[in-house]
Image (spheres, rainbow, N blue to C red):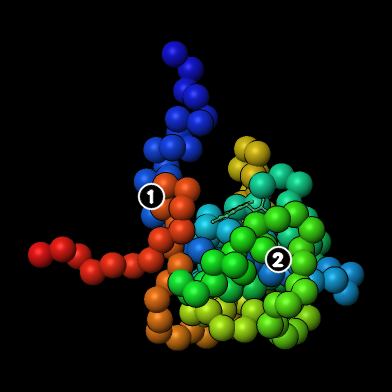
Amino acid sequence: MPLDPLDYRKVIGHFATGVTVVTAAHNGEPYGMTANSVTSVSLTPTLLLVCFMDGSETGIAVRESGWFCVNILDATQVDLSNKFAKQASDFDGVAWHQGEMGVPVLEGGLGHVFCRVDRVVDGGDHEIVIGEVVTCDGTDGDPLLFYEGKYRQIAPLKG
Ligand SMILES: Cc1cc2nc3c(=O)[nH]c(=O)nc-3n(C[C@H](O)[C@H](O)[C@H](O)COP(=O)(O)O)c2cc1C
């Protein structure tokens, strides 16, 4: 029996992740996309990857501009995550400033990782963007998590 991609989606949904908004600037416009397919790849050189679904406007902005920022969300930022999970990036009401190369940096959250696009690899119906980390900052707090298609918050281990 061929694999049903929806079965796979259900199974991989048991792999808990954090939640980020990946931002970019292209032709003077800010772009942002909620993403959990963010993985640290290498320390030396310092690389991370993000997978962008084909047609993602933010993915195009990242590829064309060559720069992006991974904004790591905290548990208070569900609304922000939902806002950037829609097509057509809408920064209305969002607290942000222009960082290096004009890339939007969202205020708050647990950290910001600013990257230069190192390479773009074909990944089926996604593009895998590998970025070289240029600068980063972070702070302690409660992360926003995503598990089984729902937002979650960290809880201490039982026992
Ligand atoms: C928690 C969460 C994680 C997501 N992760 C990704 C991701 O890693 N890659 C992706 O392409 N889309 C992801 N999405 C969907 C995008 O946020 C959504 O398709 C968005 O509309 C794309 O915006 P854009 O076309 O303006 O770039 C995620 C959505 C949610 C709610």
At horizontal 75% and vertical 84% (from top left) the residue drawn is 98
Closer to the camera in the image, 30 or 108: 108
| Disc on the earlier residue, 2 or 1 | 1
User: Dot 1: within a 10 Å radius of its alpha carbon, few (fewer than 14), some, or many (20 or more) residues?
Assistant: few
The residue that label 2 is drawn on is 32
The CA distance from mark 2 to mark 1 is: 24 Å
Taking 11 as reference, is 36 left or right? right
The tag on residue 15 is 1
The kind of residue tagged 2 is Gly
Q: Residue furthest top?
A: 1
Q: Is mark 2 within 8 Å of ligand 1?
A: yes
Question: Which quadrant is home to the C terminus?
Answer: bottom left
Q: Which residue lies furthest to the right in this view?
A: 27
The kind of residue tagged 1 is Phe
The percent position of residue 130, horizontal first and vertical second, equals: 60, 60
The percent position of residue 17, horizontal first and vertical second, equals: 43, 58
- What is the secondary structure assignment of the residue under circle 2? strand
The percent position of residue 36, horizontal first and vertical second, equals: 52, 58
- Quarter of the rendered structure image containing ligand 1: bottom right
- Residue 100 vertical placement versus 27 (above, below): below
